[in-house]
Amino acid sequence: MKPDEEEAQSQVDWDTSDARTLYANAFHAASGREEVVLLFGQCVPAPGDQGEERLEFQERVVLNPFVAKRFAMQLQNSVRTYELTYGPLDKESLAIEPTSFHGSGTMDERARLLLDLVGKLEVVYGLEYSFKVLENTLLGNRFLVIMTKDSIRKQTNRRLLDICSQTGMPRELQDIYRENLSFAKYIHFGFEENEKSSIYKAYLEFPPKWEAEFLNKPAGADSFTLYLGFKWDASENRKRALTRYSYYPLIPPEKILDRLSNLYEGSRQRGSLEIAKGILETALGRIGYDNLLYLEVSEDNNPRRSFDINMYRAKLRLEELSPYLSAMCRHFSIPPERFHAVYDPMRSKRFGHLSGGIDREGKDFLTVYYGVEGYRKGSHNHP
């Protein structure tokens, strides 16, 4: 067979126009000599006061053993990618919506609005908290909601665009969001309070296809857009930004450090670089660099240059990074009592990822993300 004939045969055009989406929370697998059978469906309460649940299987998929093996390998890779991005799935534990705003008091009505809108989607979602540190400033009212697009069972695009509209996303950003929504695999919504205002955020995360694209290129030599971020002021949405997150697959540690040094080049505040290096080296003491996600962040028409390093796979607790977090506090002149008010209640939470660099106003910053937890729709009694 000729090389171009092989290439032509390897290209597959998937037609999903008639595909049916089933959100399954129950499954069963069985096998015989000639086939593997997968059953998918729902676990629902039994009628009356029987105190038990009933499984309703709605789809049966039959595979030959060779296809089943390939499917199992692909499923394992997908779970690995999920855990690499959002943290290990150690146990299935779903709370009924958030009960506190870690280390920062109650939520205001704008944060509550976003969580109420997400709750109406009736999906399981992850909730990740973070705190951001700048000179003389520690911001703890921040969270990020994470879900799969396929888990939204009806009128997916319209319902997501409704959330964007009801939280005031500018029309120009809505148009870009709509244009790219069909390519996204994961959906994120976020909220943060800063020194001056409150910010809404929306992210589209695209499926990673770098394995084939970069197979024959040097590690870390290329990047691609993994996320698009849409950010706007909750009170004055003319203040907005479109953010691109470029992912550098399998970039080795020495190149990460080189790129971090370049990001801070010319900055008088090099202390953040040393803190980032220390946290990175601690994570690498647990895992190989192939278990990290290194991204760089850019926005048009402003001086922002920053990074994000996802280290969930290292399974570090925040308290294991205490020396670096204390150094962060000193570097940014944060009073110890202010830092510990945020840090102490969540010191046992799992560390997720670190972002930092120079923000759009030219300020040095570091942000610590931690503790993704699963939630489902409940009584909407947010704090």
Image: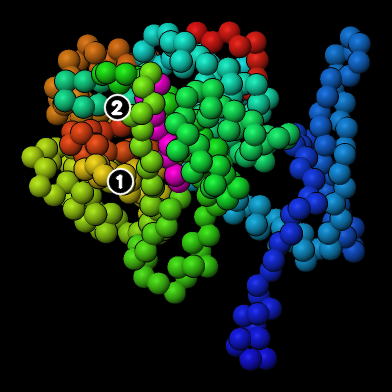
The reply, left or right, for residue 355 in relation to residue 110 is: left
The reply, left or right, for residue 182 in relation to residue 53 is: left
- Quadrant of res 329: top left
Is residue 323 among what the camera can see?
no
Q: Is residue 296 above or below residue 234?
A: below
> Is residue 362 highlighted in magenta?
no
**Percent position of residue 248, x then y:** 38, 56
> Is residue 233 highlighted in magenta?
yes
The reply, left or right, for residue 194 in relation to residue 72 is: left
Q: Are marks 1 and 2 in contact (CB under 8 Å)?
A: no
Labelled disc at residue 66:
none
The amino acid beneath tag 2 is: Lys
- Quadrant of res 357: top left
In the picture of the structure, the residue carrying the numbered disc 1 is: 300
Report the magenta residues as a range.
Answer: 227-234
**Percent position of residue 77, x then y:** 59, 54
Residue at 53% across, 60% down: 209
Label 1 neighbourhood size at 10 Å, few (<14), some (14-19), many (20+)?
A: few
Q: Is residue 173 above or below residue 218?
A: above
Label located before the other in sequence (1 or 2): 2
In the picture of the structure, the residue carrying the numbered disc 2 is: 132
Mark 2 lies on a secondary structure that is: strand
Q: Is residue 141 above or below residue 159?
A: above
- Quadrant of res 380: top right
Mark 1 lies on a secondary structure that is: loop
The amino acid beneath tag 1 is: Asp
Is residue 262 among what the camera can see?
yes
Residue at 39% across, 26% down: 237
Residue at 85% across, 14% down: 51
Label 2 neighbourhood size at 10 Å, few (<14), some (14-19), many (20+)?
A: many
**Percent position of residue 102, x then y:** 41, 16
Give the number of the mark in front: 1 or 2: 1
